[in-house]
Amino acid sequence: MGAQREQGAKAGAYVADALIAARQPPAGEGGALHWVRSNLLGNWRQMALTLFGLWLLYVIVPPLVSFFLLDAVWQGDNREACLPLEEGQAVGACWPFIQAKFNQLIYGFYPAQERWRVNLAYGLGAALLLPLLVISLPGKRLNAALFFGAFPIVAFVLLTGGHLGLSAFLPFLPAALGFWGQTAVVAVTLLGAVALWSLWRVGPSALLRNLKRVGMMLVVAGLVLAAVDMDFGLAPVETRLWGGLLVTLVITLTGITVSLPFGIALALGRRSRLPLVRICTVAFIEFWRGVPVITVLFFAIYMLPLFLPGNMNIDALLKALVGVALFASAYMAEVVRGGLEAVPKGQFEGAEALGLKRTLALRLVVLPQALRVAIPGITNTFIGLFKDTTLVLIVAIFDLLGALRAAFTDPNWATPSTLLTGFGFAGLIYFAFSFGMSRYAQALERHLNREMRA
């Protein structure tokens, strides 16, 4: 016994009772100089690529800086300010042109006295979107419900004046509603809200969950019906007056909001065990993927009215929104399906072994992993959708690029540098949005990977 204690004491002498302090890296293996040697000057191939990259920067960057900044014109009232005073004089970007056409590029031909509604919609969207993007902030479920549920209705009312125009499809509603009908709709909405709140406080059960869903449906239906032909005190603004960045963001946000959940549903339907569901989803996906988006827009704007009844007229922008959303949903479905295929089969089998039903296994185990894997493809689809909004110009819908082309026709700003200035400004806007989406997706992917490793 004493020998064992002596051996234990000797072994304890070799066990550290405190963490060893971090040591400095060996000389030459850390810092900026080591990074340059390892990544830029490691061998002759890296040296050649480094020299080629420096040559490209020398060829591209100085002329751009000179045109857009050093030689640019910053003040002026017309084209005379952007013309060279002497023959051979270098004249850079004509920024007074952007200043003069800024409202047209942002709002299109939206009435000037009503542009506060667009600014309010921009502000509400940013106020709801930014907290949703910050991962550490709580209340994501409520924030998402407000952004994807309430904000589209509020933005629609602000931008159009609240005139839904559903009387073309349901002609009995305006006459049936009237004052008392609208009062009844509001009352039903309030009752649904009260019932939903009270059930939310009771606790979870199968019956209560179904009643909660009924209450939510009553609230949504009441809000939609209350907006039919209701006067909100806002002057109606037709969508043909919209343009510029407003149209670009409306099409992009609508496409993103619709394509992601609809694409997930299509991807799950394509993997369904029911033959009818699988055949229908495959047919839908392959049809929309096999048709160019320009053809979709042409058919929606010019061909679809030929198949509708004579008294039915659908807004052109609405038809373009539906076409773009369906087109993006088909591509999103394949991206999500790729993520589902990347999840090992053992994950689903393990969820079933724990007693989870198939729907719960998909929602709680398989789908979160699939979406994490599909983040790069989803981001790429969103960026492509944002840039493809320029195609609506072909069907006479003036997005940012369309408003810019319309601004070029003003003879008061016809200069050699006006064209390059306008396209440079539009390129900066498209790059800012696309780069922002890309960087956020990378940050989200790193965050999810850290959680998976933890």
Image (cartoon, rainbow, N blue to C red):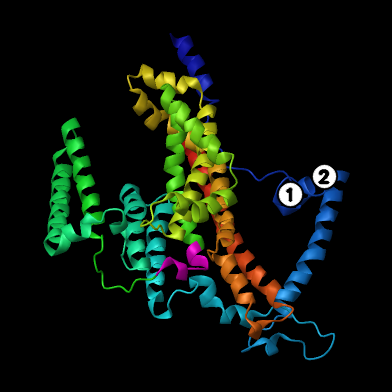
Q: Quadrant of residue 291?
A: top right
The answer to whether 236 is drawn above or below residue 112 in the figure is above
The residue located at (54%, 49%) in the rendering is: 296
| Neighbour tally class for label 1: few under 14, some 14-19, many 20 plus, Cα within 10 Å | some
The total number of labels drawn is 2
Query: In this rendering, does residue 321 appear at all?
Result: no
Q: Quadrant of residue 164?
A: bottom left
The answer to whether 424 is drawn above or below residue 368 in the figure is below
Magenta stretch: includes residue 108: no
N-terminal label among 2 and 1: 1
Q: Is residue 289 left or right of residue 38?
A: left
The residue that label 1 is drawn on is 35
Q: Main secondary structure of the magenta part?
A: helix
The residue located at (58%, 49%) in the rendering is: 295
The residue that label 2 is drawn on is 42
Q: Residue placed farthest to the top in the image?
A: 1
Kindly identify the amino acid type of the residue bearing the numbered disc 2: Gly
Q: Is residue 12 left or right of residue 183?
A: right
| Neighbour tally class for label 2: few under 14, some 14-19, many 20 plus, Cα within 10 Å | few
Q: Is residue 148 left or right of residue 389?
A: left
Kindly identify the amino acid type of the residue bearing the numbered disc 1: Trp
**Helix, strand or loop status at disc 1:** helix
Q: Position of residue 370 (x, y in %)?
A: 49, 33
The residue located at (47%, 48%) in the rendering is: 325
Q: Position of residue 150 (x, y in %)?
A: 31, 56
| Nearer-the-camera pick, 23 or 180 | 180
Magenta stretch: includes residue 239: yes
Q: Which residues are magenta?
A: 238-247
**Helix, strand or loop status at disc 2:** loop
| Nearer-the-camera pick, 441 or 177 | 177
Query: In this rendering, does residue 363 appear at all?
Result: yes
| Nearer-the-camera pick, 358 or 247 | 247
